[in-house]
Image (spheres, rainbow, N blue to C red):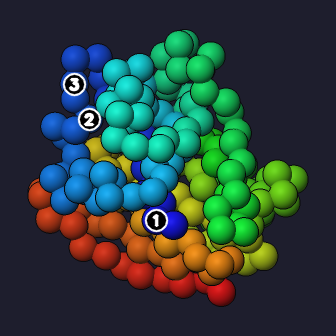
Amino acid sequence: MKLIILSDTHIRSGQSLLELLPDDLVTIIKNSDILIHAGDFETLECYNELSGLGDLVAVHGDTDVPELMELLPERQVIEVEGVKVGVIHKGQLTSDNPDGLRYLAKEMGVDVLIFGHFHHPIIEDFEVLLLSPGSAIVPGIAEPSAIELDIFEGRVRGRVIRCDGDVCSYFEYERK
């Protein structure tokens, strides 16, 4: 199964996510099995645009409108090919210590914990796999990014998708 992971799109009212995302990334999203968004859509319109692209699994973020806060959970767990995947927006993480997120992943009973809030990609693999896709729209100091995961028979392979204009490149990793 192919999962595409986004977070922190921060689309304001009147903006279109699909117009702001690189064309390559929109194509990748449309060809995925599951799209995961780890919060901070900001608007219901952004959520609706993404849900129109395929099977969307999402949680609310701390800047989302009240309608999204009511519609979406704070945490979510799905199982993909025998791998339990948790999604949360803002976990317990400092820039130099991911222990809080590892404990949260154990509490949630997941093998992979996806989180947002930091606007740059983070990959930590110690006891559990911790992933932050960064932001494809508002990256801050990092390049715009997302994550692509391939999960098959309990194995997780992934790529950080770096987006520059309409061109996407990849950084690959694997967890067995």
Q: Is residue 28 above or below residue 66?
A: below
Q: Is residue 122 above or below residue 12?
A: below
Which residue is label 1 attached to? Answer: 2
Q: In this view, does 171 lie above or below 88?
A: below
Q: Is residue 82 left or right of residue 45?
A: right
The amino acid at mark 2 is: Leu
Residue 21 percent across, percent down from the top left: 22, 46
Which residue is label 3 attached to? Answer: 15
Q: Is residue 62 left or right of residue 12?
A: right
Which residue is label 2 attached to? Answer: 17
Residue furthest right as drawn: 107
Q: Name which of mark 2 and mark 1 comes first in the sequence.
A: 1
Mark 3 to mark 1 CA distance (whole Å): 28 Å
Which residue occupies 21% across, 67% down? 168
Q: What is the number of callouts on the image?
A: 3
Which residue occupies 55% across, 13% down? 66
The amino acid at mark 3 is: Gln
Which residue occupies 18% across, 52% down? 22
